[in-house]
Amino acid sequence: MSKISYRQTAPQPLRLGDWLRHEREARNLTLAAVAEAVEMDLSLVHKIEKGKRYLTERQAARLARLFEADPADIEARRVAEEIHHYYGGNPATPMALQILNDLPMAPANRNAKTP
């Protein structure tokens, strides 16, 4: 008879809004405190947590710094959410993602503004 382990950790939330709420609540921070720390409007932080708004690259970098998270992971999740938002209902999306995965990486945009 196999044993069931109840010590497994919960998977990290996939949506950035869920991640943001989890990190904020784990640190007992208010929406206002997070908004002030990352120079964002309180209502925007609330909408991001609810999945009604999406982060910019700069906002994602600021949140990663605040919560000491891997900036590459947060940026990847941000990009994934944008792809899902704009193309999630398109039946060609899985094939397009496979094509993208097979392409060589493009050089970083050197003109991009840093947070």
Image (spheres, rainbow, N blue to C red):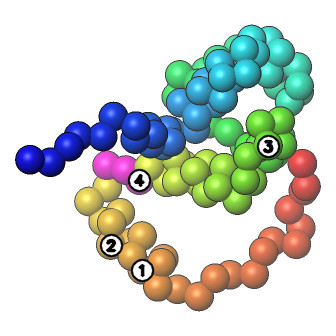
Span colored in magenta: 85-89
Asked if marks 3 and 2 touch (Cβ < 8 Å), the reply is: no
| Residue type highlighted by circle 3 | Glu
Residue 30 screen position, x and y as percent: 74, 11
x and y percent of residue 97 in the render?
42, 70
Task: Kindly identify the residue that appears in the image at 61 percent across and 24 percent down.
Answer: 21
Which residue, as the protein is rendered here, is positioned at the far left?
1
Q: Point out the tag, 4 or 2, that comes first from the N-terminus.
A: 4
Asked whether the residues under the numbered discs 3 and 4 touch, taking CB atoms below 8 Å apart as contact, a structural biologist would say: no
Select label 3 or label 2 by which is in front.
Answer: 3
Is 41 or 71 nearer to us in this picture? 71
Q: CA distance from mark 3 to mark 4?
A: 30 Å
The residue identified by callout 2 is 95
In the rendered structure, which amino acid carries the disc numbered 4? Tyr
Q: Give the structural element (helix, strand or loop) at label 1.
A: helix
Q: Position of residue 88 (x, y in %)?
A: 37, 50
- Mark 2 touches mark 1? (CB < 8 Å): yes
Mark 3 or mark 4: name the one nearer the start of the chain.
Answer: 3
Query: Residue 68: which numbered mark, if any?
Result: 3
Q: How far across and how far down the image is residue 41, in percent?
A: 80, 19
Picture quadrant where residue 99 is located: bottom left
Instruction: Note whether 97 is above or below 17 in the view shown.
Output: below
Depicted 65 relative to depicted 103: above or below: above
Q: Nearer the viewer, residue 3 or 8?
A: 3
The 10 Å Cα crowd at callout 2, few under 14, some 14 to 19, many 20 or more, is few
Which residue is under mark 1? 99
Rate crowding at label 3 as few (under 14), some (14 to 19) or many (20 or more) other CA atoms within 10 Å: few
Asked if the magenta segment contains residue 94, the reply would be no
